[in-house]
Structure formats: C-alpha cells, structure tokens
Amino acid sequence: MKAITVVPGDPESLQLDEVADPEPGEGEVLLEMIVAGICGTDHEILEGDIGYPPSGRDRLVLGHEALGRVLAAPPGSDFAPGDLVAPIVRRPDPVPCPNCAAGEWDMCRNGRFTEAGIRGLDGYAAEKLSLPHEFVVQVSSDLGHFGVLVEPASVVAKAWEHIIHLGSRGQWAPERVLVTGAGPIGLLATLFATRPGAEVHVFDRASDGPKPDLVRDLGAVYHQDGPNSTGEEYDVVVECTGDADLMAAVPGVTKPNGIVCFAGVTDEGRQVTVASDIARAMVLENRIVFGTVNANRRHYEEAARVLAQTDESWLRRMVNRRVSLDDWEEAYTRQPGDVKTVIEFPDAAA
Ligand SMILES: [Zn+2]
C-alpha cells in the first residue's frame, strides 16, 4: 500500500512510499483511510526539528489527524465494517505510569508514551491502518469527512475541560474569553469557547483570507490590533500562537481569578518572561497560567460530539484545501489562505 513517510531529522526525506499492508493483531481494527489532515507538528517533523521513527527503523509513516472507515472489527468491539472513525494519537507508556494506567495518557508522567506519526509509532497518512480498537473513536456519518478535525478538536476539548476544572475552584461563570491565533487550533478553541455563551474575542494578525469571517460566523469578535485593543479584561485566555511576546503579555489582560491556557508551543530557546507586576497580580488575585497538550479518549469523544453539532458550511470553510493522494507534495507546501489542508485518499469520494 501507499504511505507518506519521512526520516525524522532529515528535511529532504519526505516521500510517497510503498509499504507492507497492515496485518491486524488480536483486538485490532482494520481501517481504510479516507482523509488525513496536516498540521504544524507535521511541518516541524518535515523540517527535521522533531519526531522519532519506530524502534529499529529509519522511516516513520507521517500523519496523526485522520478519518478512516472500518474494514474489519474484532469481536466484542463497538465497531462494524463501514463505520467512520478517528484514530487516537498517543499510546500509554509501557510501565505504565499511574495516569497511563487509568487511560489518562495525555497526562503521562514518565514521558515514555508513543505518538502515531510523531514519536516511535507509524502514523495515519497511509492507505490502510490497523490498531487496537480502544484507540479508535466513532464519528457520526453526519459529520462525515469533517471527522478529520476530531484530533485537533480533541486537544481543544482537553484544554477547555481543564479550564473548567481550574475555574471551578471558585464561583465561576466566564463572561469574556480571549483566543490568540486564528489557525485551526485557535478557531476550534473559539468554537468551544462560544458554546457556553461567553463573549469571545479572537486576536490574529491576518487582515484578509478566511480567518476573520470564520471567527465572526461563530459569533466571536475579530481583532487584528493586539490582544487588549478593547482595554477590557478576560476571565479566560487561550493562547494558541506560541509567540513568546504574546505569551508574556496575556497574563496581564486577565481579570482577578483569570485563567491563561498555553496551547501553542513556543520556539525552543525563546524566553517567555512574565513581568514582576504581572507575577505580583497573579498571586494577589489568584491568576493561573497553565499548559496543555494532547488528549485522551474522553476528549476525542467530546470533540466528535461538538463537531457533529457544528454548522457544515463552517466546517467546509475550515477544511479549505483538499489535495488528492496523487498530488501529495502540494499538500505539504503551505499556501496563503490555508486554514486546514487535508489529503484525500483514493476512495474519499465513495
Ligand atoms: Zn505514562
């Protein structure tokens, strides 16, 4: 079968490869791939900055955002041939640590987890795939191909769950939320933030392209002129850019008891320095800054639920560049106006 592979650490190594078909083991589902998404993490792997191949190999099958169709399911699983599913990225560490043992592998304590298409485990940009049925999440047929967004949305579902958990240390009903960055994660964060009815503001530098309307169509306010252009403060900030200056600035635009969630990774070596007056205000008014990464099964299920309730035309404008597997190289070349780029596998139209 065909698969897109890369040698992690070698920026010239991306290719469409011929690899062996998967042979499902006991308890595994066999999937045919329909759509695979591309995100910033894939580009970091392509640039040679991150990623590890499976042990004993040079090449890694890329891809960790995917929607597949079940070809065969093991007895006793919740799946049947024809079901649409999203595969989960992270697998528990082998020890396992207390969190991985409890299915909370997104909170792994020893760092020995693996991640499909990123770290020690083949990814999902392949025509077929087999994996344990516990690491596959049902996607409703109404959501269809947009189920490729379940993985990036799972990251946001986790972030929002943790924000609610932290906010609940006191009386809490967030009225104003700020999202910085209107890329796929920022837009999905906006989708989650608008659901409880909060007033949501989004800051991004883009003045044209699809982002401003994607934000406004969720009922949020788009700002191009800085995170605090209104002069008002926020109960919650979800920082999705990884920009060191923004990360340093956003704790200063929160209300008392405010929560800042860092969901974007800053470049290695860049310093994020919180000014002493902001640090003082964090203590005196109970502010929190926390980071979040990855997601567990519960978050994937929540993501699939929320996306299934989302307007289809919005999802269509979000997944705004679709490239066929034959033209796979184009998919990995960034273009102006890209929001989410996906690769469609040969039977995607079926
Ligand atoms: Zn663990």
Image (cartoon, rainbow, N blue to C red):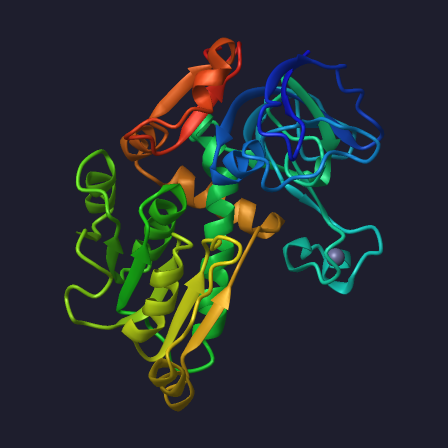
Label count reads: 0
Query: Which residue appears at 25% of the width and 58% of the height?
Result: 200
In this rendering, does residue 62 appear at all? yes
Quadrant for the N terminus in the image: top right
Query: Which residue appears at 66% of the width and 14% of the height?
Result: 17
Query: Residue 160 lies in what quarter of the image?
Result: bottom left
150 vs 273, nearest the viewer: 273
| Image position, residue 303 (x, y; %) | 48, 45
Give the residue furthest to the bottom. 284
Q: Is residue 181 shown left or right of residue 53?
A: left
- Write down which quadrant ligand 1 falls in: bottom right
In this rendering, does residue 142 appear at all? no
| Image position, residue 267 (x, y; %) | 48, 52
Q: Is residue 120 shown left or right of residue 179?
A: right
76 vs 30, nearest the viewer: 30
Query: Which residue appears at 28% of the width and 35% of the height?
Result: 314
In the rendered image, the vertical position of residue 16 relative to residue 39, given as above or below: above
| Image position, residue 295 (x, y; %) | 58, 51
In the rendered image, the vertical position of residue 28 relative to residue 270, given as above or below: above
Query: Residue 274 lies in what quarter of the image?
Result: bottom left
Give the residue furthest to the left. 230
51 vs 170, nearest the viewer: 51
| Image position, residue 106 (x, y; %) | 63, 55
Query: Residue 310 lies in what quarter of the image?
Result: top left
Q: Is residue 67 shown left or right of residue 102?
A: left
